[in-house]
Amino acid sequence: MSDPADAPPTETDGVLAELSRLKAESEARTAELKAIAAELPAAVGRRAMLRSLAGDALANPNKAEAARRAWGRAQRAPSWIRHRIEAGLRRDDPTA
């Protein structure tokens, strides 16, 4: 009678080894993502977010391109939002 441990490896053994390797990689990525998430602030206030956004915009070396992209996105916004923005811009325009 032969011992099952002495049997040649089967295709199932290869699949199980591959699954084991993939599971170990997945667990490593999960641990890495949890470590990154732990470093992030728990919550960011609206004012802090807007202050950060304004600071990033002022530090941007290509302000004109950023403004063009923002305007293009605003024009794809729903019409009621776009009309409110445009009305506010007209109201602030001293030449109007």
Image: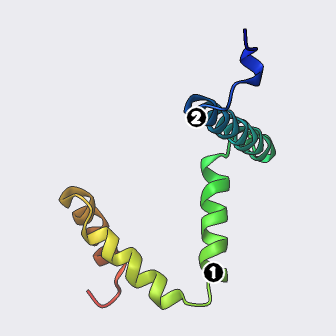
Q: Secondary structure at mark 2?
A: helix
Residue named by callout 2: 15
Q: Earlier in the sequence, mark 2 or mark 1?
A: 2
- Marks 2 & 1, CB-CB < 8 Å contact: no
Instruction: List x then y, in percent, for residue 36.
Output: 76, 47
Seen in the picture, residue 61 relative to 66 is either above or below; the reply is below
Decide which of 45, 43 is in the foreground and name it.
Answer: 43
Q: How is the image coloured?
A: rainbow
- Rendered image quadrant of residue 13: top right
Q: At 68% across and 54% down in the image, what residue appears?
A: 48
Amino acid carrying label 2: it is Val
- Rendered image quadrant of residue 2: top right
Could you tell me which quadrant the N terminus lies in? top right
Instruction: List x then y, in percent, for residue 66.
Output: 48, 82
Decide which of 2, 22 is in the foreground and name it.
Answer: 2
- Rendered image quadrant of residue 41: top right
Neighbours of disc 2 within 10 Å: few (<14), some (14-19), many (20+): few
In the image, farthest residue toward the top:
1
Q: At 72% across and 16% down in the image, what residue appears?
A: 4
In space, the residues marked 2 and 1 are separated at their CA atoms by 54 Å
Task: Tell me the tag on residue 3.
Answer: none
Decide which of 93, 16 is in the foreground and name it.
Answer: 16
Q: Secondary structure at mark 1?
A: helix
Could you tell me which quadrant the C terminus lies in? bottom left
Seen in the picture, residue 18 relative to 58 is either above or below; the reply is above
Q: At 71% across and 44% down in the image, what residue appears?
A: 29
Task: Tell me the tag on residue 58.
Answer: 1
Total residue callouts:
2
Q: Nearer the viewer, mark 2 or mark 1?
A: 2
Seen in the picture, residue 78 relative to 10 is either above or below; the reply is below
Amino acid carrying label 1: it is Leu
Instruction: List x then y, in percent, for residue 73.
Output: 33, 70
